[in-house]
Structures are given as C-alpha cells and as structure tokens.
Image (cartoon, grey):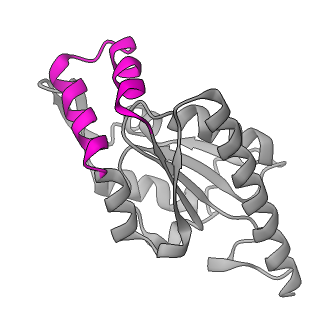
Amino acid sequence: MNEGKKGRTRPNILITGTPGVGKTATASLIAEKLNMKYISVGDLVKKHACHEGMDTEFDSYILDEDKLLDLMEPMMSGEDESDDDEEITEGIVTDFHSCDFFPERWFDLVLVLRANTEVLFDRLAERGYSEKKRNENLECEIMQIVLDEARESYAEEIVHEVPSNTLEDMESNVSRVQQWFDHWVKSNDEES
C-alpha cells in the first residue's frame, strides 16, 4: 500500500471547537467507529504537566505549548514506542479547544464543531462554569474564534465546520467522517 499524505497509511484527525460543543464525545465515537487511537489533549496537559499553573480567573490551565508539542510529536508522527496497542498502528483522532499552535503536517482533517449559543450556554452551566467563563466561551463561539484559527492555520480543503447541537448532529458528523475516512484510505490505496 502506498503511504498517503505525510507518509501515513491512515489519517490523523483533529476535532476542535469552543469548550462545550461536544469535542470529546465526537472524537471518542469517531476513534471507536474507525478503530483509530484517541488522544485527549486536555488529559495530556494535566497528566504530563504541560502547563504553567492555573489561571484562577477562568479556572483553567495556562498551556505550555512547547512542552505539549514536544510530548505529542512522537505520538503524531507514529514514533511513540510507549503505545502497546498492536491493533491500532496508525491514525489518530485528537481533540482540543485550540488548534492554531499544532503543526499543519499533523492533520489530514480538521473538524470544527459549532453549537448554538442557547445549547452551549446550557452545557457550560451544567459543567458549573462561572458566569465570566461562560460569557467568555459564548463570545468565542459567537465570534467564531476557533473556526477562524482553523481556517488561518490549515489548508482550506481540510477544515470543515459542522453543527454540534444534538445527538443527531453528532451521529451525522461521525457518519460524515467515516465516509471521508473511507475515501481517504481508498484514494491512498489507488495511488499504490
């Protein structure tokens, strides 16, 4: 089989969007459905202390981008020897609320989840976010900050904006990614 874009035989996918849009649920389902490895960037930040402490005003970590990228590079390039999953040798689904600092070469698809502000407000309130943190995230969604970051950071053809308001939206997004995945794999097989 011919190796596809960036030397991979299976794609890497980034799921991004404002906190509360459903990134983790969507990424987990995609990884499970496509038998890909799922990496939660937020969990890596916490587990490996890829931060410079807490921002008490927003109750969130202050990201150390360099430390995180150094940690993720072997994972994203397929050189991570600590992974003992023999079934999943290539292809990663990862999620994070920011995307502009990841190298473009890591991803073949960038899915930007979007939610209506009413839906997002309820999800953030359910998480116990402070009013200030809720308002900051709602403003971010209204101003499409994450979508603009993705469009500025990655090739136009790999960035896709999709709704994430309902369970049906999530199922549709997973189905669309599966179709894209099948096409990506087939296209790379045909090149051999």
Q: Can residue 55 be spotted in the picture?
A: yes
Q: Quadrant of residue 39?
A: top right
**Depicted 177 relative to depicted 78: above or below:** above
Q: Is residue 37 magenta?
A: no
Between 189 and 42, the one nearer to me in the picture? 189
Please tell me which residue is depicted at 62% across the width and 61% down the height of the picture: 12
What range of the chain is rendered magenta?
115-144
Please tell me which residue is depicted at 34% across the width and 52% down the height of the picture: 146
Query: Number of marks in the image?
Result: 0
Q: Would residue 65 be found to the left or right of residue 53 on screen?
A: right
Return the x and y of residue 14 as percentages of the image width and height: 53, 54
Please tell me which residue is depicted at 33% across the width and 42% down the height of the picture: 50
Return the x and y of residue 111 as percentages of the image width and height: 53, 54
Between 1 and 173, the one nearer to me in the picture? 173
Q: Main secondary structure of the magenta part?
A: helix
**Depicted 66 relative to depicted 165: above or below:** below
The C terminus sits in image quarter = bottom right
Q: Can residue 100 be spotted in the picture?
A: no
Toward the left, the furthest residue is 57
Q: Quadrant of residue 8?
A: bottom right
Return the x and y of residue 140 as percentages of the image width and height: 25, 42
Q: Quadrant of residue 100?
A: bottom left
**Depicted 45 relative to depicted 148: above or below:** above
Return the x and y of residue 80 as percentages of the image width and height: 61, 56
Please tell me which residue is depicted at 14% across the width and 24% down the height of the picture: 56
Toward the bottom, the furthest residue is 191
The N terminus sits in image quarter = bottom right
Q: Is residue 140 magenta?
A: yes
